[in-house]
Amino acid sequence: MTTLIAKFVLPVLVVAMLYLLISGNFFSPSPFVIAAQLFAIGLSVWARRTFQPGQFNIAAEPKPGARLSTGPYQLIRHPMYAAALILIWAAVLGHLSLSTAIVGLLVTGGIAIRTVVEEQLLRAHYADYAAYAHRTKRIIPFVL
């Protein structure tokens, strides 16, 4: 069941971003929101560029090759999910309302489920994943 839910996280994330964009709740004149969203984009680009050619996979299934442990993956196990959460929550907090909060909570719940499913797959695929998970945080460096 959780694997099925995990497959819908990416479309939910895309729909959430489109909703925030179309409703005028994505961009904000606040320098704090702009800074957070630029940081999120930078983190996402850094994480994506860390992958070797052909290794990146949108599905939560690992591809053949070494486990990533460079770039942002030295500090956190899921920097792209962290970037998505920062991007969405910056928009939500920049335009806080019931509808934007619901969007933020849905995205957060979906990403939480997806990280659990993905980590199960990664533990099964990489013998050293448990040790890597022990020394790095899931989403927020040094915290969570």
Image: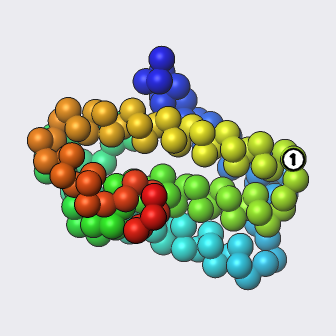
Residue under the image location 48 percent in, 52 percent down: 81
Could you tell me which residue is drawn at 69 percent across and 44 percent down? Answer: 105
Q: Position of residue 124 (x, y in %)?
A: 20, 32
Identify which residue is drawn at 23% across, 38% down: 123
Image quadrant of residue 70?
Answer: bottom left
What kind of element bears circle 1?
helix
**Side (left or right) of 113 relative to 20:** left
Q: Is residue 123 visible?
A: yes
Which quadrant is the C terminus positioned in? Answer: bottom left
Question: Percent x, y for residue 5?
Answer: 52, 25
Question: In terms of depth relative to the viewer, which is nearer, 143 or 36?
Answer: 143
- Specify whether 76 is left or right of 122: right
Q: Is residue 135 left or right of residue 16?
A: left
In the picture as drawn, the residue positioned furthest to the right comes out as 97
Dot 1 alpha-carbon crowd within 10 angstroms: few under 14, some 14 to 19, many 20 or more: few
Q: Amino acid at mark 1?
A: Leu
Choose top left, top right, bottom left or bottom right for residue 31: bottom right
Residue closest to the eye, 134 or 102: 134
Where is mark 1, residue-wise? Answer: 98
Q: Which residue shows up at 28% across the image and 33% down it?
A: 121
Measured from the top left, where is residue 103 in percent x and y? 73, 44
